Image (cartoon, helix red, strand yellow):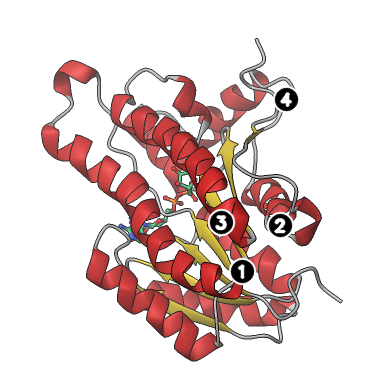
């Protein structure tokens, strides 16, 4: 028996990286999974790769831009129609457009706000209708240690701290309806996002990871599986008395 037997989980930005790792874990624990990503072919391919992991509940891939209301409403409607409901939402889709403040463009500010904050808002609004009706739902939002401030990430940092305020408010508003909302703030996780940061800094990926591992109290970088494990707990019924919280999953990188 899995913790997510009979549950339908929707994970955004899940064609790769942390989202895919989380989708894989949820499928292994019995969930039917909808992988949402910008590119439908990439989302469907990722859904196809979940099958061998033991999920018998089914997985589908849906192309959707989480910052577009029409696209979001259509995606959530498809999940309900094709998988028979929706019980868990993981707002994971994300982008970076890093630059020092004086070079940061209005376009890159808006892009980052739209994907992280507006995207989480639109997806949550579409899902909560179903959650409230059935008096059951789990929402998990991806924040970041960068919420605490990070040079070159004024846009991303503001969005990721915004996610924490959004999560606390969802906890207050939706708690009476059997809905839990929490956030995870990952530290350095080895994905294409951090590989792109290495490229931007003109550093070798392995060297970039090695330096980050060396500076971390637990002397390693994180992997999507580290986030997936915490996500599975927070979205499970074992965590039903936890809401509005942000859990830092970062190897202690911000402890001092
Ligand atoms: P990733 O490997 O870059 O994957 C992000 C995925 O989101 C990509 O497949 C991307 O699609 C998709 N996406 C982007 N914009 C979208 C949109 N508008 N609608 C739907 N999907 C969209 O990133 P990751 O490292 O796994 O990060 C996942 C989440 O964790 C993000 O919210 C990130 O900010 C957060 N996080 C990551 C780290 C880290 O160290 N990796 C640390 C802290 C927080 P395309 O490829 O088509 O753009």
Asked whether 164 or 110 is in front, the reply is: 164
Query: Residue 219 has which mark?
Result: 4
Q: Residues within 10 Å of mark 3 (few under 14, many from 20)?
A: many
Secondary structure under badge 4?
loop
Identify the residue position indicated by label 1 in the image. 135
Where the C terminus falls, by quadrant? top right
Question: Is 199 positioned to the left or the right of 244 in the image?
Answer: left
Q: Nearer the viewer, mark 3 or mark 2?
A: 3
Secondary structure under badge 3?
strand
Query: Residue 232 has which mark?
Result: 2
- 196 shown above or below 158: below
Within 8 Å of ligand 1, the CB of disc 4?
Answer: no
Question: Is 232 positioned to the left or the right of 211 in the image?
Answer: right
Question: Is 68 positioned to the left or the right of 3 in the image?
Answer: left
Earlier residue among tags 2 and 4? 4
Asked whether 255 or 171 is in front, the reply is: 171
């Amino acid at each position: 028996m899995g913790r997510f037997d009979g549950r339908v989980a929707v994970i955004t930005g899940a064609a790769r990286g942390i989202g895919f790792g989380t989708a894989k874990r949820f499928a292994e624990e019995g969930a039917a999974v909808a992988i949402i990503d910008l590119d439908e072919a990439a989302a469907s391919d990722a859904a196809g790769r979940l099958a061998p992991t033991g999920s018998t509940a089914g997985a589908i891939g849906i192309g959707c831009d989480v910052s577009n209301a029409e696209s979001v409403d259509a995606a959530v409607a498809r999940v309900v129609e094709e998988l028979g409901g929706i019980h868990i939402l993981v707002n994971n889709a994300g982008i970076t457009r890093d630059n020092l403040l004086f070079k940061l463009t209005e376009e890159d500010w808006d892009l980052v706000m739209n994907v992280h904050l507006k995207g989480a808002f639109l997806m949550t609004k579409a899902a909560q209708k179903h959650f409230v009706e059935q008096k059951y739902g789990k929402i998990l939002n991806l924040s970041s240690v960068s919420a605490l401030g990070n040079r070159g990430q004024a846009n991303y940092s503001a969005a990721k701290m915004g996610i924490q305020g959004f999560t606390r408010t969802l906890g207050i508003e939706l708690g009476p309806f059997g809905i839990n909302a929490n956030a995870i703030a990952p530290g350095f996780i080895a994905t294409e996002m951090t590989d792109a940061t290495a490229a931007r800094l003109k550093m070798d990926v392995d060297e970039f990871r090695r330096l980050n591992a060396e500076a971390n109290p637990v002397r390693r970088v994180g992997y999507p599986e580290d986030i997936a494990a915490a996500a599975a707990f927070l979205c499970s019924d074992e965590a039903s008395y936890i809401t509005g919280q942000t859990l830092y999953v970062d190897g202690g990188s911000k402890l001092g």
